[in-house]
Amino acid sequence: KRHLISAADLTRDDAVLILDTAEEMARVADRPIKKLPTLRGRTICNLFFEDSTRTRISFEAAEKRLSADVINFAAKGSSVSKGESLKDTAQTLEAMGVDAVVIRHHASGAPYRLANSGWIDAPVINAGDGTHQHPTQALLDAFTMRRRLVGRDAGLGKGLDGRRITIVGDVLHSRVARSNVDLLHTLGAEVTLVAPPTLVPVGVENWPCEISYSLDEVLPKSDAVMMLRVQRERMNAAFFPTEREYSRRYGLDAARMAKMPEHAIVMHPGPMVRGMEITAEVADSDRCTVVEQVANGVSIRMAVLYLLLGGSEPAVTTARTEEN
Ligand code: CP
């Protein structure tokens, strides 16, 4: 494959290959010098039209660990404010010799347009577009689940068959939920969405998952519970749920977490709003994998970049490292 636009484009074999490659990449982080020469001489542009902390820094860390040259572009402070289009911005960057583009955009479909327009030749990786897709987030989430629920070594070559994953909250505006439903289904997991009726997307009955409106009923049957942020920035203010009402029905606190099986984990893609969808006590508990998810994101993004750009090079296990 030349681009990574949607988790729905990945076959089971593609997804398992990325997860297994990420396990190899994770070993680099355990070394004194956390670098491989794989993408030396290649230039990657991180094109961010929407705010980000985790994804932007994680891609940059992954690119640097693979020895790529990195160009960071933020729409704020650029000529986008003067009316420059995505096409002209992308072509300007490609003229400077960019070998791959990582793009986050507030418009659903912008990465697909960039990849299929003929505007540029470079591979395109979607770092989150509108309410549509965030495929590397879904991959890092699946990687975290496979490690915790199947095992780091035991999981190699495997999916998440039969694991029960619950995704809770503002599904309507969540590209993380969409990407996770697609990828988790491909990997054999059983997904249940729990959301207020006003935050359920039209057509959700055609998604490969169940819908529930009772968090308390679903928790005891969950191996992982993923909490979503209420995305006020994508809502009309008239529809904001109140914090108290939302957290009472759909928030995860310690009493609710106690209803989960002992082995079950709590996940969150970040950024979290403590006190709304998750209490501080749950966010800081050792069952919550939010920090682990961030660390795993670097390994996943290294794997995606390696497979899209450096696939003819030796795999990590045999690659010459900077320390050799
Ligand atoms: N999870 C995630 O995409 O976070 P950022 O918006 O900070 O990148």
Image: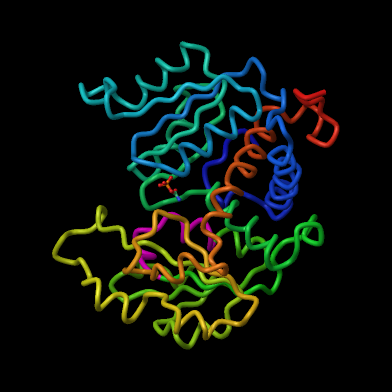
Task: Give the residue at the far left of this rendering.
Answer: 238
Q: Which residue is drawn at 62% across and 33% down?
A: 2
Q: Which image quarter holds the N terminus?
A: top right
Looking at the image, which is closer to me, 248 or 240?
248
Residue pushed farthest top? 96
In magenta segment, residue 235: no
Q: Residue furthest right?
A: 318
> Could you tell me which residue is drawn at 45 percent across and 73 percent down?
205
Q: Where is residue 210 in the image (x, y as percent from the top left)?
A: 51, 77
Q: How many labels does the image show?
A: 0
Nearest the viewer among 279 and 171 is: 279
Residue 8's spot in the image, x, y percent? 56, 53
Looking at the picture, does residue 195 appear above or below residue 158? below
Q: Position of residue 59 (x, y in %)?
A: 53, 36
Segment colored magenta: 169-181
User: Residue 190 at x, y = what percent?
Assistant: 61, 73
**Residue 149 vs residue 276: left or right?**
right
Q: In this view, does 251 lie above or below 70?
A: below
- Which residue is at a point 52% across and 42% down the rendered structure image? 5
Q: Which of 197 and 150 is in front in this view?
A: 150
- The reply, left or right, for residue 76 in relation to residue 99 is left
| Picture layout, residue 118 above or below residue 20 | above
Q: Residue at 27%, 24% (x, y): give it.
A: 77
- How has the structure been colored for display? rainbow
Quadrant for the C terminus, please: top right
